[in-house]
Amino acid sequence: MTVSSAVVAQQNRCVRKFREAEATSREAAKTLEEIGVRDSRLFTRMAGRGVFVDAGAGKYYLDDEAWEMFRQRRRRLMLTLTLVAAAILVSLQLWYWSKR
């Protein structure tokens, strides 16, 4: 498993725990302890992107719309990186053939 796929798996696991705890609205917000999530760097980063919203009193909830936008942004980034890598490989191959 690559580092990026491990991070994606952790992100998905964290979101799943929020859903299982039914912490998906301000009214249903819960503490991280109740949800079973640690206050990790991954959590802080996702909270910074609006995926997890601080409802006050140490309680958080999952913003499904922000989660979907986060996932779309992640997919676009991966697609962009893949296309850049492919372009570099094609350029290298063309350069190699021109030197023959």
Image: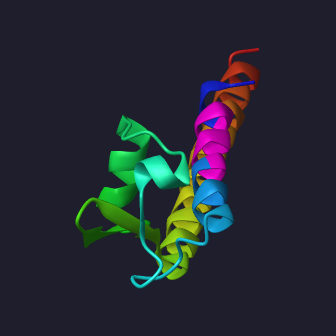
On the question of residue 25 being in view, the answer is yes
Residue that lies at the very extreme toward the top in this rendered image: 100
Total labels drawn? 0
The image position of residue 47, as x and y in percent, is 35, 58
Image position of 31 with respect to 72: above or below: above
Where residue 59 sits, quadrant-wise, is bottom left
Q: Is residue 56 left or right of residue 74?
A: left
Which residue is at the far left? 57
Left of 76 or right of it: where is 48?
A: left
Prevailing SS of the magenta stretch: helix
Please say if 62 is above or below 98. Answer: below
Q: Residue at x 63, y 44 (%)?
A: 8
Residue drawn at the location 52% of the way across and 81% of the way down: 65
Query: In the rendered image, which quarter contains the C terminus?
Result: top right
Instruction: Judge whether residue 87 can be spotted in this image.
Output: no
The spot of residue 70 in percent (x, y) is 50, 65
Report the span colored magenta: 5-13
Name the residue: 53% across, 54% down.
Answer: 35
Question: Is 98 in front, or is 22?
Answer: 22
Residue 67 magenta-drawn? no
Residue situated in front as seen by the camera: 42 or 76: 42
Q: Residue at x 27, y 59 (%)?
A: 58
Describe the colour scheme in one phrase.
rainbow
Q: Is residue 5 left or right of residue 69?
A: right
